[in-house]
Image (cartoon, rainbow, N blue to C red):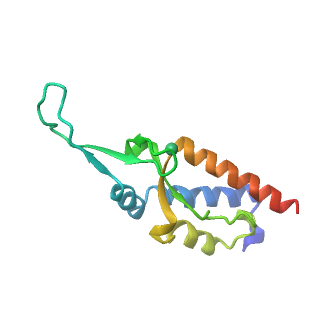
Amino acid sequence: MRELLSKKDFNLIIRAIDRVWSRSLRYKEILHSYRIVDDTPNKDGSTRKKPLYWIICDTCKGKFRAAEIQIDHSFPVVPVYTTTWEMNIDYYIQRRHCSPKDNLRPLCKPCHKVKSKYERQERKKWANK
Ligand SMILES: [Zn+2]
């Protein structure tokens, strides 16, 4: 079946799988599990009507709102010694969606970008070996 897909079509499927993950209930539950309540009162001393939540980035230790945080797979979904194209789609889904929680951690978007870039570079080094 794989031979029916161009690389571009295949990448569209991979991106769709990634999007489903980031919108899944499990993703939201994991994200929420990292929230810490900020119960500092308002400037006028009154208590907040709505609680304020922060999530600490596992790399830079900065304080972020949930929308600025992404759940990272510490050990990447696509191991550095292979490429997405070489992976079986079921295995990809399993690694993207079923990663044990100890392989997941909250990262702010800039830190996640740096880590992903590093992984891509490592993958290239492997490919050129
Ligand atoms: Zn960070």
Q: Quadrant of residue 78?
A: bottom right
Q: Quadrant of residue 34?
A: bottom left
Task: Using residue 114 as the reference point, say whether residue 35 is left or right of it.
Answer: left
The x, y position of residue 105, in whole percent, is 47, 58
Q: Is residue 9 above or below residue 65?
A: below
Q: Quadrant of residue 13?
A: bottom right
Q: Nearer the viewer, residue 13 or 108?
A: 108
Q: Nearer the viewer, residue 90 or 57?
A: 57
Q: Is residue 59 above or below residue 82?
A: above
The furthest residue to the left: 46
Q: Nearer the viewer, residue 88 or 79?
A: 79
- Taking the spot 65% from the left edge, 56% from the top edge, the residue there is 12
Q: Is residue 108 above or below residue 9?
A: above
| The C terminus - image quarter | bottom right
The x, y position of residue 50, in whole percent, is 19, 41
Q: Nearer the viewer, residue 9 or 80?
A: 80
Task: Using residue 34 as the reference point, say whether residue 68 is left or right of it.
Answer: right
- Taking the spot 40% from the left edge, 41% from the top edge, the residue there is 64
The furthest residue to the right: 129
The x, y position of residue 89, in whole percent, is 64, 71
The x, y position of residue 118, in whole percent, is 69, 51
- Taking the spot 63% from the left edge, 60% from the top edge, the residue there is 14
- Taking the spot 72% from the left edge, 74% from the top edge, the residue there is 1
Task: Using residue 89 as the reference point, say whether residue 110 is left or right of it.
Answer: left
